[in-house]
Structure formats: structure tokens, C-alpha cells
Amino acid sequence: MKCIDSHTHTYFRSSDDLELMSVSGVEGVVLCSYFPVQPTGASTVYDFFKFLSDEECARLASYGIDFRLTVGIHPRSIPKYELDLAIERILAIFDNALANALGEVGLETGGEGEVDVLIKQLRIANEYDRPVIVYTPQKNKEMVVDKLLGILKEEYTDPSRIVVDHLTPMLVPKVRELGFNVGLTVQQGMLTPSDVKEVLESYGPEGVIVNSNLGYEPSDPLAVLRTAKYLDRSGISGRDIQLVTYSNARSLMWF
């Protein structure tokens, strides 16, 4: 069994975790950028992106893990100063083909400043024809998702190239009706494999992508594989399992 983990922050994890992923069947990962503090200025943002593209991508490759790098300004990590310069850094990265997608970007509270940063980044993704990984918060998720969907419909031309991530099962139909992909995160405090099974039985596998959100918070480097095995034991078809743990992510991110 093999999988692609469509939302990771492997730079927070040990080499032992990468080795485990490699030998267990994690064929590829989407490496999402998230800086866990508010940067002071654009230079911090640039240095972080450079670390990901130069160092972390090489580390993943050394373990035989294919990867797709995303860069973006997370709503929790909007720099205090030089925001426009930080946005220009993203433009330069796409100009030089150093990243495959925009992410993770989104809204935390839905405030005016967050909305402005999100819109500027979505316009870059449109210009460069890049997929987008969209973050949704734990608090007030339904309200923020409604606001996000309105922005995404207005600002991004191809909904099939967006993943609205960290969703709850009840939000799946609302997101799929608009043509966006659904990100289901199997992680402590988010979803369980049983929740994924519920989604597949209710709505099917099209546009559904399972991920681990692997990072510094409690998270399992084999969450996607364990979910696949749970779904198999629960009677979900092999085709549906392959779609949500491998093929949908592979198609979206051009693996």
C-alpha cells in the first residue's frame, strides 16, 4: 500500500520519522509552509522559504520521498512589517519555479487584514496557475469557511485546483457543491479514520483528500496509511481508498 500525504510540515519532524514514512509506503508529501510565530519582517519570511526550498526538500529527497513545495503566508504568520515585500518574495519564488503551489493560506478570524493578505496571494496563484492549499481554523470554523468560500469563488478561477483543508464532515457537501476539493485531516483533535469512512459513505471519494497535518503538534507520520488500512477493514472499496489517499492528491499536485 502506498500513499501521498497532502499536508505536512516535515521540517518539525525527526529523520527517524522520515525514514519510517519512506519504508512504510509514503511515496510523496506536500510540504506546506507555516511559521509558528509572527515574523517581524519580510527577511524572516524569505529565510524560511529559502530553508524549505534548499534544505528541507533535499532532506526529503535523501529519504526517497517525492515532494511538492508550497509557499504562502499563513494567517497566523502575517509579518508585522514589510508585508508587501514578503508578498514580493512569493512572486520571486514562483518566477524562479522554486515552488509548486500556494499554501497554506487562509483565514484565522476573518478580519480585514487577513482577507487582504489572502486575496493578494490568491491573485498570485491565479497569475502563475498554481494549486492552492487553504487553511481553515478550529474556532468558528463554519462561519470562517463561509467567508472563505465567498472569497475563493470571487478570486480564483479554477475551483478544482483548490483544497479547502481541515474540514469537518458536515462542511464537506458545502465545499464540494462549489467544486473545491475537501481536505480531511486525521490528527488528534481533528478527525479519525471513522470520520473519513462517514464522509466516503455519505458523499463519495471524488474531490476528497486525506492528510496528516504532520508537524510540531501531536500527529502521526503514518496517519494516511493507517486510515487506508482502517477503510479497507471497514469494507470501503479499494478504488475509493486509492482515490482519497493517493490518486486525488497526485492529480492535483502533479506528482
Image (tube, rainbow, N blue to C red):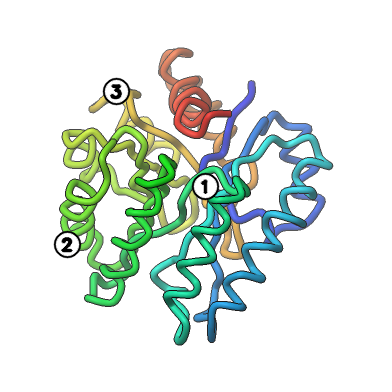
Q: Quadrant of residue 244?
A: top left
Q: Which residue is mark 3?
A: 204
Q: Residue at x 83, y 42 (%)?
A: 62
Left of 198 or right of it: where is 64? right
Give the Cα distance between marks 2 and 1: 23 Å
Q: Residue at x 17, y 62 (%)?
A: 143
The percent position of residue 200, horizontal first and vertical second, equals 32, 27
Q: Which residue is mark 1?
A: 7
Label whose residue precedes the other's in the sequence (3 or 2): 2
Contact, mark 3 vs mark 1 (Cβ under 8 Å)? no
* Mark 2 surroundings within 10 Å by alpha-carbon count, few (fewer than 14), some (14 through 19), many (20 or more): few
Please, what secondary structure does the residue beneath circle 2 have? helix
Q: Residue at x 52, y 40 (%)?
A: 6
* Residue nearer the viewer, 255 or 127: 127
Residue 143 - label:
2
Please, what secondary structure does the residue beneath circle 3 have? loop
Left of 63 or right of it: where is 3? left
The percent position of residue 249, horizontal first and vertical second, equals 48, 31
Three-letter amino acid code at disc 2? Met
Please, what secondary structure does the residue beneath circle 1 have? strand
